[in-house]
Every structure is written in C-alpha cells, then in structure tokens.
Amino acid sequence: MKNSFDRITNSWLYKAGKAVGDVVIISLFFVLFCLPVVTIGVSISALYYTVYRKYTKKSDDISKDFFRAVRSNLKNGIIIHIIYSLYSAIVGFNIYFALFGFRGVRLPEWYTLISFIPVLPLIFSVPFLYPLVARFSNSVKETIKNSFTLCMINFPKFLLIWLIAAIASAICVAFPPAVLLIPTGAMYLTQMITEKAFASAINRSKSNEGKDDGNE
C-alpha cells in the first residue's frame, strides 16, 4: 500500500497536478484578499511574498506564508494603497479636466500635455513598491523612496514589470478564469526582476559601507 502511494506521489502526473494546484491556491488567496478593495496592496504584497517563498526558498506552506505576509504588511499595505489610490484619482481627474473640461470649464490646449506629467511619479515608483513591502521592514516613506530609487537605477528594466502587469491584466479581463493562474505566473516573472535588483542594491550598499569604513 505504501509503495503504491509512493509511486503515485512520485509520478510526473501527480507532481504536475500539485504544481498547478499550488498556483491556483496562491492566485485564489490573492483574488479573495483583493475583494475588500482597500486590501489590494496587502494582497499584492502577500502574493509576492508567497511566490518568493514558494519558488525561491522552496517553501511548501503556502497558506502559512500568505497569511503571515498579510499580518505583517497589513498596516503599510493599506496606507500605501490609499495614498496611491487618492493620488491616482487626482491625476486621473486632472487629465480628464484637461481633455474634456468640467461643467463647461475648458482649460487651454497647452495644458493637455502638462496634465500627464503627474503620472510620472506613479510610473517611476510603483513597480518595486509592493515587493519592497513584502520583503523589507521599512516605513511607508522609506518604502516609497526606495522604490523610486530602484526604478532609477534599474531603468529601463523596471518597465518590464509594467509590461508583465499590463499583459497579465489584459489576459484576465479577456478571459476571467485565467485569474486562477495568471497572478502567480505574473508575480513569478516579476520577482525574477526585483530579486536581482534587491541583491544588486544590497551588494552596492555593502560595498559603499566598506569604502566608508576604510576611509575612517
């Protein structure tokens, strides 16, 4: 009986089914925790942490990793999500106002191009934002600043994160059942970029500290 069970659990079919099942479970956790809306940032951070633990650290305790990340990042995740949501709403209204006017008031045509400038802080800070929340314990201010810095020193590679997110979102909108697979897959590709950036930044920081110690 034991030998038969071992043969089943060691078969490629069982391993493939388990791999797909893990992807579905992680994605399902992510989707469920996005439903309250205000916890979207927390859910993204938890998704990142769980994918990192599962595929980089080879952890098999998916639910434990996900809920640990939710508890650890609840406060900062919600605060960051609210800040960026409010800012995005203001930027969106600004662009709408510039393009179509509001209640009969129209702005000069030259302002249309200027209205898109406030989008830049979003483009240059969001890609590393939630991975930083997931992996490091920093204040909200430090997290935002570090995300912006990482985007600067990883230009234009950070644009790949935007591309991954855009393609993943488009697939899920076009084919909703894909939401059970795509979030985990997209985050796996994302963490391949972010983890290299984190390692490079940490090594650079250690190198600079070594130089400072040597100059003292």
Image (tube, rainbow, N blue to C red):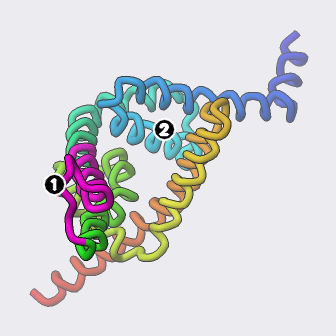
Q: Say which element carries label 2.
A: helix
Magenta region, mostly helix, strand or loop? helix
The residue where tag 1 is placed is 141
Where residue 115 sits in the image (x, y, percent)?
A: 26, 66
The residues colored magenta run 85-108
Question: How many numbered callouts?
Answer: 2
Residue 8 position within the rendered picture, expressed as x and y whole percent measured from the top left: 86, 22
Local packing at callout 2 (Cα closer than 10 Å; few below 14, some 14-19, many 20+) is many
- Secondary structure state at the residue bearing disc 1: helix
Report the Cα–Cα distance between label 2 and label 1.
24 Å
Q: Which of 4 and 192 is in front in this view?
A: 192
Amino acid type at circle 1 is Lys
Q: Is residue 202 visible to the viewer in this orientation of the structure?
A: no
Task: Judge from the rendering whether residue 140 lies leftward or rightward of residue 191; answer left or right.
Answer: left
Q: Is residue 51 visible?
A: yes
Q: Do the residues labelled 2 and 1 touch (CB within 8 Å)?
A: no
Tell me if residue 106 is in the magenta stretch: yes
Q: Using the image, tell me which numbered label, if any, was put on residue 50.
A: 2
Residue at image point 53% right, 28% down: 61
Residue 182 x %, y %: 62, 41
Residue located farthest toward the left when viewing the structure as drawn? 216
Identify residue type, mark 2.
Thr
Which residue ends up furthest to the front in the rendered image?
Answer: 104
Residue at the image position 88 percent from the left and 24 percent from the top: 7
Image quarter in which the N terminus is found: top right
Q: Which residue shows up at 77% across the image and 29% down it?
A: 17
Q: Is residue 18 left or right of residue 10?
A: left
Image quadrant containing the C terminus = bottom left
Q: Which of 53 and 70 is in front in this view?
A: 70
In-front residue for pair 127/49: 127
Vertical position of residue 99 compared to residue 15: above or below:
below
Whether 160 is among the magenta residues is no
